[in-house]
Image: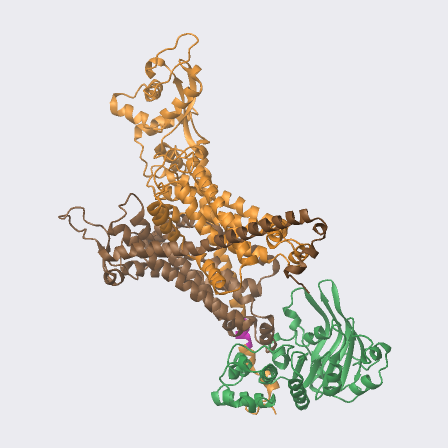
Chain colours: A brown, B green, C orange
Amino acid sequence: MIDSSPATLPAADPPAAGNPLSRRGNRARRKLQRSVEAAIRLALLAASTVAVLVTIGILGSLIVETARFFELVSPGEFFFGLRWSPQIALRADQVGSSGAFGAVPLFAGTLLITAISILVAGPIGLLAAIYTAFYADRRTRAVVKPALEILAGVPTVVYGFFAALIVAPVIRDLGTRIGLDVASESALAAGLVMGIMIIPIISSLSDDAITTIPKALRDSSYALGATRSETIIRAILPAALPGLVAAFLLAISRAIGETMIVVMAAGLAANLTANPLEAVTTVTVQIVTLLTGDQEFDSAKTLAAFALGLTLFIVTLGLNVIALQVSRNAKLRHG
Amino acid sequence: MTQLISERELPSAAAEPRTDAGGDIVKMSARGVNVYYGDVHAIQDVSLEISKDEVTALIGPSGCGKSTLLRCFNRMNDDIVGCRVTGDIRLDGEPIADSEMDVVELRARVGMVFQKPYPFPKSIVENVAYGQRIHGLAKKGAELDAVVENSLRGAGLWDEVRDRLDSPANSLSGGQQQRLCIARALAVNPEVILMDEPCSALDPIATAKVEELIDELRGEYAIAIVTHNLQQAARVSQKTAFFHMGELIEFGSTSEIFTNPKIQKTNDYITGRYG
Amino acid sequence: MRNCAMVDPKSHWQSQRFKSRLRRRNRFERQFRYLGIAAIALAGLSLSVLLVSVLANGLGATYRTEIALDIEFDPEILGIEVPGAGETAEITASADFRAVLRTSLMQRFPDAEGRSEVRELVALLSRGAAAELADRLVEDPALLGQRIEAWIPASDDVNFWLKSEAGDSGSNSRLSERQVAWIEALAADDRVARRFNGRFFSSGDSREPELAGIGGALIGSALTLLVTLAVSFPLGVAAAVYLEEFAPDNRWTRQLEININNLAAVPSIVFGLLGLAVFLGLFGMPRSAPVVGGLTLALMTLPVIIIASRASIAAVPFWIRESARGLGASPVQVVAHQVLPIAMPGIVTGTLLGLARAMGETAPLLMIGMVAFIVDVPTNFTDAASALPVQIFLWADSPERGFVEKVSGAILVLLALLGILNGAAILLRQKFEQHW
């Protein structure tokens, strides 16, 4: 038994027992040590609160600037307006630059590119995870998994270069050859390349979700005479569904917040279209466009970027929280 | 030692039911079976048969290879990387090797129940209907309902779940889940049921129910059960095979093995000298 | 108790219906398997196309086309006073190296007459050629008055003409017929060559592709990452130590954990907005400075380091703490002397991976203005600077054709650096991986 009551403390410290002087010294030292320890603990606590401060900082700065933006442009216009043209007239008589801040075309463009990327990455990532978990031998796994990790480690600016200078021209040429008119900054090119970027996210998270399903479930299905594919489709995937949903939600969140690929490969024109061959613009593209170069900090233009940023933050955070919740529930169920 | 089938039977003889020395009809036979896990020789030259209308118990200390052998009868070892099985295993005289029989057909005819019950994350009905659906057995809804009811009755679970067939299978108790897994196996209409320590995760009351069930099923199916519980083997089985270090030490009628073993090692194990 | 609704089961397994169904099922099984292989092949194909296209373009970035000319550093043409004996020449800013180059070219091609022809002749050379020549004379003033053969960088148009000539001639070349004739004459004399371009690694950005280098961006990245490391490593480790070793298990702690996990998934551009609003707006720090970029990336890297460090600290077995405590060590001593040294390889691995991510990050740096066109190589944390990924972005956006090659070259360098960081992390993990 451990007894930490003060009465037994001196006994636990034999060298100090005989000499009253050193005992006093010890006590002082112990006191000093205790205050040093307390200081260190306080410092550690402070360090851990930095993460919260960052969150508060993000929320605070975004909310403050957004509030100022909404003084100039009504939230109704921002969230439901169909026209985005943030050029503010320099002179009153300037033509065509009224400055419209309807963000719907941006949301639609973001969704279009995200949808394309998930359509690409979803099946490929999921099937790759299934293959490595159920079919591949150890050697194949040892090659495939690091290769996917490389794909995940490539900086997004490189994907952007790939999309803008290599994939987009190819798609345009192909389109022209079969008689389609493809914009040089088509949503398709950006979406395709973003899909490639997202493959490793989906495959590794799906792999986690699939491999946490106990082997017993797999065996139960095999023992009933189900083939591997039947077992996967009818038993494993339903059991892993929460984890898979979480994987897709995180991937969507990542796609929505991705910046460089769309900045480099998607357009600036805020077209409200569902045609992947046309150019669309996204929330992140507009944030970058509005804020790069020397801007006046207080103009509606720069403030609009913060409103877009707040929207982006809330949406991605929401997706993330839901994904974590879903996968936590799944973990509870599978023990 | 025990009597094994001495002559190699030709597949043409499959039509005639063969019997062992005791007069029981042989449902499955294993001859000269070896199993290797990488370099480990897990099963050494084992020959054994599972009789129709009887329960055959496989006993022995843990790691003796009894589960491994059981898994040979429906080729569950196929799915284990690095596992190699040699020897001749037959179902009704037909060889079950990969080149001879599709594993899907084999597993449909030879069902298996595992140590820990693991229902699919579906409703009770869908768990039982799983095999029917993948094999395309029942066509109409009413037909499927009948099969589900029969299987659940067969597993002694019908009265407990008839009112909540559509609730998730996970909501059942451990013992009920194990009987659901038995019902799931019965629904495919197997000829043989392999049970790998089916009661080791259950409480005594649930165990008693499952043992009762095994006794009832005996008339319809050939049953092989792996157990580490000697009393259970004595209670439910008619034949017992004792394994040690991957070898079949003794195989005979349960009463004989438990009362009058011919081999000292068996006696030592039965009387609890080791295990 | 047989399932009465069914035919005799045995006959079912042998029935034609079951057999054909079985064939279908096995066919589907094969197709499903091929589908998996196809998915992996597709992912692998994208990866290889990406890498190959970057490699194929990028290796050229370290080479440039140069023309060998006979250069006479004639003080008269330069407009420099001839130094007396024992004195070194003073190379003034007004020294006209362009005239030296022009004279050299005109001597070589006396047929060029008139202003426009001479202008075309001079256009064969890079606009930065004069500056390079000046550097050479500054380095070695003894060259004044001498005549040497020097390799002078050719213009981007010449570079492209030479490259496209290899493929299909007569493509959309920007060279005039006369210029082509001159180049061909020089080439026939072995005076045109692709030569290794060391300046690519040392010089700053430039409007001219043949002069642009990643030196400035590399230094900018290094300065930025130093700030990132200096801020996020101590903070991250301290936070992880607190959460693993000292934090009470209460609501506040759990909120903190959730907060950190969520922060790790916030889009990087949002961190850029934070940096813009707080560091630039609120604190008034300088735009485009590595210190601001580093701080912004540090906030982004912080959750990564905390999560990795916590995992590493949590993996230290409990008995090590117990036995240290049993010897009378205080909780802080246990952490400092026992837990942290054991957890350190894992922490460093996580930090390296976090830094690798920060190194490839572009969007937050755009927000805080590290995207300006900067020619000078930065020398301290508050200089205006660029970073390697931002440089890639700038060049990729540039209309000059020569920059495609530069972009690929810069990407290669970035990927190589990331490979080194990640490789070091993996090595470290393998070397110190402990199993308790």
Q: Residue at x 68, y 66 (%)?
A: B83
Q: Main secondary structure of the magenta part?
A: helix
* C187 vs A188, nearest the viewer: A188
* C157 vs C393, nearest the viewer: C393
Does residue C123 lie above or below B55 as drawn? Answer: above
Whether residue A36 can be seen here: yes
Horizontal side of residue C81 vs A130, given as left or right: left
Q: Residue furthest front?
A: A20
Counting from the top left corner in percent of width and height, residue B68 is at 70, 73
Q: Residue at x 35, y 48 (%)?
A: C276
Whether residue C6 can be seen here: no
Does residue C312 lie above or below C110 as drawn? Answer: below
Residue C54: image quadrant is top left
Does residue C128 lie above or below A221 as drawn? Answer: above
Span of residues in magenta? C22-27
Horizontal side of residue B76 vs A208, given as left or right: right
The quarter of the rendered structure image containing the N terminus of chain C is bottom right
Counting from the top left corner in percent of width and height, residue C182 is at 35, 26
Horizontal side of residue A64 vs A325, given as left or right: left
Does residue A77 lie above or below C342 as drawn? Answer: below
Q: Residue furthest top?
A: C85
Q: Residue at x 54, y 77 (%)?
A: B120
